């Protein structure tokens, strides 16, 4: 590998930087999603919605204490601002959560685009070197000419390799973010419906919920 790296020429150094950045982002996002999946508590989400349906805000506060589930955080944001604008509060919280989920994805996307371009750049440099040698009468030494072609092939392969291996985790992380966004939308909408029904019921009966969150 070291010999191939040296033969690839100076373009291999920025390609190495691209590969290190890509690996760092992939590992960081992988740990992020493992942590978020472990923090998910579907039962708690269902319990919160049921308590909200009953208007038991104090019990909601006690049940969500210490929870790090991103869905719970969004629901709590909506509940805290229920008397003002529940929908806007949850929309703002959801935007922040989705932003965390898409963190560094633009970096990975950039590496997928830049790595092949750097590979092509190395290809062009290698071909230029080969033609310079041919123009200088080095046709008597085919090995010197093929060195430039070898350099071109190494950089192209390296750039494509980085891009190809980055596409799969990039698409996977994007799909995770999309799925999370749909989950957030689902439960945020459910909370809005539950709260609207509670308000309508309380208005008819002249009853208020138990305490406040």
Image (cartoon, rainbow, N blue to C red):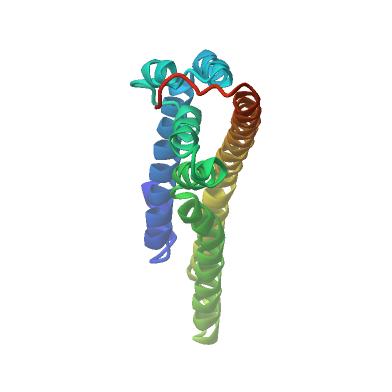
> Residue at point 53% right, 14% down?
47
The residue that appears at 37% across and 16% down in the rendered structure is: 62
Q: Position of residue 194 (x, y in %)?
A: 63, 26
**Which quarter of the rendering shows the C terminus?**
top left
Decide if residue 37 is on the left or right side of residue 62. Answer: right
Q: Quadrant of residue 14?
A: bottom left
Which residue is located at x 42 percent, y 15 percent? 59
In the depicted view, which residue is nearer to us: 39 or 49?
A: 49
- Who is closer to the viewer here, 146 or 24? 24
Counting from the top left corner in percent of width and height, residue 186 is at: 65, 32
Please state the horizontal and vertical placement of residue 168, each as a whole percent of the image.
60, 40
Residue 85 picture location, percent across and down: 52, 45
Asked whether residue 140 is in view, the answer is yes
In this view of the protein, which residue sits in the foreground, 32 or 165?
A: 32
Is 171 displayed left or right of 208 in the figure? right
Q: Residue furthest front?
A: 206
Farthest residue in the left direction? Answer: 66
Q: Is residue 60 above or below residue 187?
A: above
At x 33%, y 21%, the residue is 66
Left or right of residue 195: residue 138: left
Kindly tell me whether residue 146 is visible in this rendering.
Answer: no
* Quadrant of the rendering where the N terminus is positioned: top left
Number of numbered tags placed on the structure image? 0
**Location of residue 170 by image quarter:** top right
Q: Is 58 drawn above or below residue 182 in the view shown?
A: above
140 versus 160 height, above or below:
below
20 or 91: which is nearer to us? 91
């Amino acid at each position: 590998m070291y010999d191939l790296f040296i033969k690839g020429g100076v373009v291999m150094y920025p390609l190495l930087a691209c590969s290190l950045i890509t690996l760092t982002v992939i590992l960081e996002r992988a740990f992020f999603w493992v942590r978020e999946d472990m923090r998910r508590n579907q039962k708690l989400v269902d319990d919160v919605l049921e308590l909200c349906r009953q208007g038991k805000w104090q019990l909601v506060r006690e049940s969500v204490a210490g929870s790090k589930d991103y869905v719970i955080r969004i629901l709590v944001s909506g509940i805290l601002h229920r008397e003002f604008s529940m929908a806007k509060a949850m929309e703002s919280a959801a935007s922040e959560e989705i932003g965390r989920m898409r963190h560094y994805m633009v970096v990975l996307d950039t590496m997928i685009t830049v790595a092949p371009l750097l590979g092509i750049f190395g290809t062009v440099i290698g071909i230029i070197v080969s033609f310079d040698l041919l123009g200088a009468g080095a046709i008597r030494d085919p090995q010197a000419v093929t060195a430039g072609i070898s350099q071109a092939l190494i950089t192209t392969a390296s750039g494509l390799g980085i891009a190809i291996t980055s596409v799969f985790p990039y698409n996977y992380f994007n799909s995770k973010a999309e799925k999370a966004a749909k989950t957030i939308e689902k439960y945020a909408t459910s909370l809005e419906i539950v709260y609207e029904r509670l308000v309508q019921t309380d208005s008819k009966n002249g009853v208020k919920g138990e305490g406040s969150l």
